[in-house]
Image (tube, coloured by chain):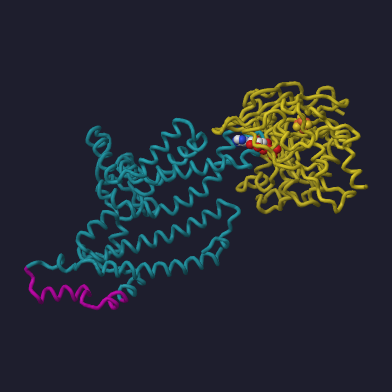
Amino acid sequence: MTVFIIRRLMQAALVVLIMSFLVFSGVFLVGDPTEILVADDADQAERAAVIESLGLDKPFHIQYLRFLTKAAEGDLGESFVFNEPALQLILDRLPATMELAIAALLISIVFGIPLGVIAGLKPDAVYSKFIMTGSILGFSLPTFWVGIMLILLFSVQLGWLPSTGRGDEIHYVFGFPTSLLTLDGWSHVLLPAVNLALFKLSAVTRLARAGTREVVHQDYVKFARAKGLTDQRVIFVHVLKNILIPVVTVLGLEFGGLVAFSVVTETIFAWPGIGKLLIDSIGLLDRPVIVAYLMIIVLLFVFLNLMVDICYSLLDPRVRLQDIKA
Amino acid sequence: MANSDVPTLEVRNLQTHFFTRAGVVKAVDDVSFSVRPGEVLGLVGESGSGKTVTGFSILGLVDEPGRVVGGEILYKGENIANASDERMRRLRGNNIAMIFQDPMMTLNPVLRVDTQMIEAIQAHENVSRNEAWERSRAALEQVGIPAAEERLKSYPHQFSGGMRQRVAIAIALLNKPDLIVADEPTTALDVTIQGQILYEVQKLCEETGTAMIWITHDLSVVAGLADEICVMYAGRVVEHGTVNDVLDNPAHPYTLGLINSVPSRNRRGEPLAQIPGMTPSLLNLPKGCPFKTRCPRVGPDCEIEPAITHPVTARDVRCHYPVTAGEAAAPTSEVTA
Ligand SMILES: Nc1ncnc2c1ncn2[C@@H]1O[C@H](COP(=O)(O)OP(=O)(O)O)[C@@H](O)[C@H]1O
Ligand code: SF4
Ligand SMILES: [Mg+2]
């Protein structure tokens, strides 16, 4: 276990290093932030001063090395726009995004698994076909369009739910700010969470259905029935425990995707999270924030991968951590 | 000995068909037999002859698109062919248990052995977990699993194939059923373990008076185990009688063919007389006798499907030209000549 984790951490460090290079060089190539940062009527000397203060006059490798040494100290640079540490900007907005992603994850699990199991048990029933058609829509409708439709229907037409922002009453749980402790908070998060969840919900439904269809034909399910177990026990213990293995794996890996894809949803619903910050920063060519955002996402993915492998070994007794190809 | 007037199980003219897109597959088509307490019935036939489907029909475990479409399944006189789901659930594992062919696939890979044993008891009896655990431990010891207490905490993948089949047998024995349907339980195991398990199961049935249906494609297995045998071909019983009668004087050409294809000591070195041809597809059986394309005795009457006859006392045979006692010895005498 310890050996496994140490090996994985070393690999993770390598991945993060490679990604930092890709991210930094990618951003380096895009646009010239001075055009936005320096006032139009500024003279040559003023312009040079700004460029020098931001370190933009140095060659690429110097800039990258400086970025790396600072990053090792937890300093991902200062935002050109806000004059605040970029990391702090991200961390301030991360809880809102996490809240949204977790709400979306819950929706995917709570609805996706039962829908998938129902459709998998009776694949020829009309309601199963209905569920599967719905999941295809969930896959193929563009997120931004669904988001706008949700707002039009539930906020504009029916007036049931707010269309923008996060609940105002923020409470702290273990030091993390959340608005989910109030009804107002939930009413704000519901529409964006559904919007963000739609894709994952479809994925979980299809995965649970495929798993169920495969597992119900296994000998061990028939043997469980031959023991005289009730249908409930066969489904909730024998079938469910087996299909949870792929579902948990995919959900864990896709959680990073939820966070990353929240960009679109946050923009539509004006959700004050890191996705919206990213879009704003790209518009302003605020390089340090973009880099910090991407680095945080990389770290998140690496961390989730590790967690998934650990969960996997807990769920499936046949898998031991040292056997997972690290 | 229990009252052996009423058979533990009597199957009469059972028909189980699968309604597939390609047509109706008559997997079981007119199968009849009975077993009494303490008796072993051997159900023999090539792969695909409908043995497993017969077993599943008895337990009410035939899945879509299959259905029991005819006949009676009498458990101690009660017809359970169309019993309610709840009635069948209560019988399964409690009165009628089944052991499957492939021990590697029978146990749920993600549940511990104790979970899988305790639930089998608690599905039928309102007993505490502790008591159910204790009974599970005793059952494992009964089938010869050492360190049962340790083993209960293990997962199936920590057992060998032979040990897994013993666990499955222990599970079948947990609720002291009156009838066990054993579907080729030793086919997937190596010969030594097969022998041990055969011996132990036979002993257990004798001791407890449990009736047993032992399904196999291997005549030599039932020879030493069964009291009666039923030979199946293409979903039908083609011959039925006591094990000694049938093996010494087979009346159906198919039975004779099976016997001649078993390797035996006094014919060592001899090429085995395999039955020519293959089992016909159940979707397009030949008209008349389904065996006629492979049968050495085929004659004009075989264009009409034969009914069950009784050419010898206490024997059911489905053939127009049954083998007589003198002829059956013929292949053996050729060998000595
Ligand atoms: N689910 C099913 N759908 C269609 N046909 C089936 C199904 N299950 C079994 N059968 C048919 O029943 C026949 C008998 O199968 P089975 O009882 O498993 O044979 P055995 O156990 O004697 O080898 C097979 O040849 C197959 O064609
Ligand atoms: S009825 Fe005819 S074809 Fe069928 S087994 Fe008898 S002899 Fe052979
Ligand atoms: Mg079979």
Q: In the rendered image, which quarter is residue B251 located in?
A: top right
Q: Is the magenta stretch mostly helix, strand or loop?
A: helix
Q: In the rendered image, which quarter is residue A280 located in?
A: bottom left
Question: In this orientation, which residue lies closer to the viewer: A262 or B78?
Answer: B78
Chain with cyan colouring: A
Image quarter hosting the N terminus of chain B: top right
Is residue A44 covered in magenta? yes
Q: What stretch is highlighted in magenta?
A: A41-65
Chain with yellow colouring: B
- Image region (quadrant) for ligand 2: top right
Q: Residue A28's x, y, as percent?
A: 26, 69
State the count of labels: 0
Question: In this orientation, which residue lies closer to the viewer: B209 or B266?
Answer: B266
Q: Residue B294's x, y, as percent?
A: 74, 38
Q: Residue B110's x, y, as percent?
A: 60, 48
Q: Residue B89's x, y, as percent?
A: 65, 30
Name which residue lies at 18% across and 74% down.
A51
- Identity of the residue furthest to the right in this view: B337
Examine the rendering and report whether any part of residue B120 can be seen. Answer: no
Name which residue lies at 34% across and 42% down.
A194
From what the image shows, is residue A138 above or below residue B23? below
